[in-house]
Image (cartoon, coloured by chain):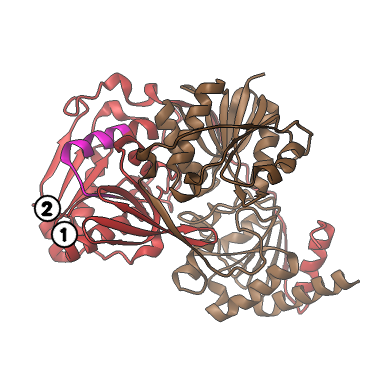
Chain colours: A red, B brown
Amino acid sequence: MNIVVCVKQVPDTWSERTLRSDDSTLDRGAADAVMNELDEYAIEEGLRLTEAHGGEVTILSVGPEKASETIRKALSMGADKAVHVSDEALHGSDALVTSEVIAKVLGRIGFDLVILGSESTDARMGVMAAMLAERLSVPQMSFASKVETDGTAITINRQADYGYDTVEATLPAVVSVVEKINEPRYPSFKGIMAAKKKPVETLSLADLEIDAAGAGLAASATEVVSFAKRPPRQAGTIVTDEGDGGTKAAEFLATRKFI
Amino acid sequence: MAEILVLVEHTGETVKKVTCELLTLARACGEPAAVWTGAGAEAGRARLAEFGAAKVYVAESKDFDDYLVAPKAELLAELVAQKSAAAVLVAATTEGREVAARLAVKTGSGILADVTGLADELVGEQSIFGGAITVQSKVTTGTPIIAVRPNAVTPEPAPGAAEIEPVSITVSDAAKGAHVTGRVEQERGERPELTEASIVVSGGRGVGAGENFALIEKLADALGAAVGASRAATDAGWYPHQFQVGQTGKTVSPQLYLACGISGAIQHRAGMQTSKTIMVVNKDPEAPIFELADYGVVGDLFKVVPQLIDEIEKRSQG
């Protein structure tokens, strides 16, 4: 099975994340860059499926040169090869443009299954799987907490507020996964060494025959009007329980009319 | 006045609260037209009228329930073109955001995801990076598609005609790729849905074990609240994953958020920082969650919470 896993390099949640004052895009210099956490689950699922059914896992990432670190990590987990779309003209691209670029690459390299994390920790839109399915005209199998496939048909459990739905489709398809799906492996020493020799194809927009004028911040369909740090919450009342903590909490809830 | 399409979220005939919130926002920007998919519109109509829907477009096909997301996007794209809609509002739920995504591709329009408010000229407010930054943004291309965070705005009634207008649409085969074959409902008792609830009671690492979540549930039931859990608790298998509040989980914005035994790592704060009132019970006075607390009790949750439940029950009887 030919599986493509999309990965994104994001600012570490643990570092202070901010936007640039000049163009309101993510300040990539201000925070450590890491692989989007849910993408590790997507890679793990891809690896498990190829271990069971044969085939290859190709990593696909759109991002600046630095994203090659994230690609190497994905390869060190066990993926076979990678495609890195890197072009300065992509700076500030929104989800619409990014999905167009990814769809273009997918159309070019072919796939039985595309797997993504269900959202990125920076933008948190949760739209990419749906956009790709729409662009590629293949079934959308998103928010999966379980994936089963025999190489032709695919069934997922789609996580929902009330539990889950079972959804069926035939391949090729786009899948996004939630963290319940598996436990991602750590790269082994052997994996890290092997990753250094795995092929990474780097593509520019010109290589993909995408007009640079249609990409990047200027082509974005949304615009940041302004942004500001959220003012700190007003300090609340903190009491130490001396046998009456529950009673005091109830009094507070009563003054706010919750009880 | 230009029409603002509002995709109705409903369970059978019952309109979800978030739809009333969307209608409230839509009224300020144009003429709200509700879009109802599947059966039940006749019965659900009254609620839409109460919150100011001028029209209700009804597409009755079973395809909207039988196939994932794509049929709804197809319907909205059709209506956007037919009615020259000024904007489309959806709930920022899993499905709402995905409908928005497909609609954006179909119509070449920008999306504002997870907005917490809407001002003049459809400028949306968003809370990003775990609530650290507030952004005002707008759509500059196409028909603005705006996904609104449930519970972020207060629904205000204002009567509308809610005139039903049937829409005939043939869902294309291309939109029938992902077939929904079953639904498995997991027990959550009579509790409200997590993202819709006006009160959420959450438990974290401090709860210590799965069986101890009974205490969190008891407090939730005393308050008529939904139950949430931190990632530490869901990863440990103490509570089902779909109740996880935080980054990679649900984002909630209730009137009251009650965090029990949750330290308040940034991942968790990302999912609850826009709650209106926050109460914390935690034995560690240094826990970062206290920075967010309107009211905090430093103490053992196994002592504080039972006493709180007793007090709530006493007051409700009195």
Question: A21 or B235, which lies in front?
Answer: B235
Q: Residue B123, how many percent across, how many down?
A: 59, 27
Q: Main secondary structure of the magenta part?
A: helix
The residue drawn where x is 48% and y is 54% is B247
Of all residues, the one furthest to the left in this rendering is: A197
Q: Which residue is mark 2?
A: A196
Q: Residues within 10 Å of mark 1 (few under 14, many from 20)?
A: some
Helix, strand or loop at mark 1: helix
Q: Which residue is mark 1?
A: A192
**Disc 2 from disc 1: Cα separation:** 7 Å
The answer to whether residue A85 is seen in the rendering is no
Left or right position of A60 against B105: left
- Read off the magenta span: A100-114
Q: Residue B45, how many percent across, how many down?
A: 70, 41
Helix, strand or loop at mark 2: loop
Note whether A121 is above or below B22 in the view shown.
below
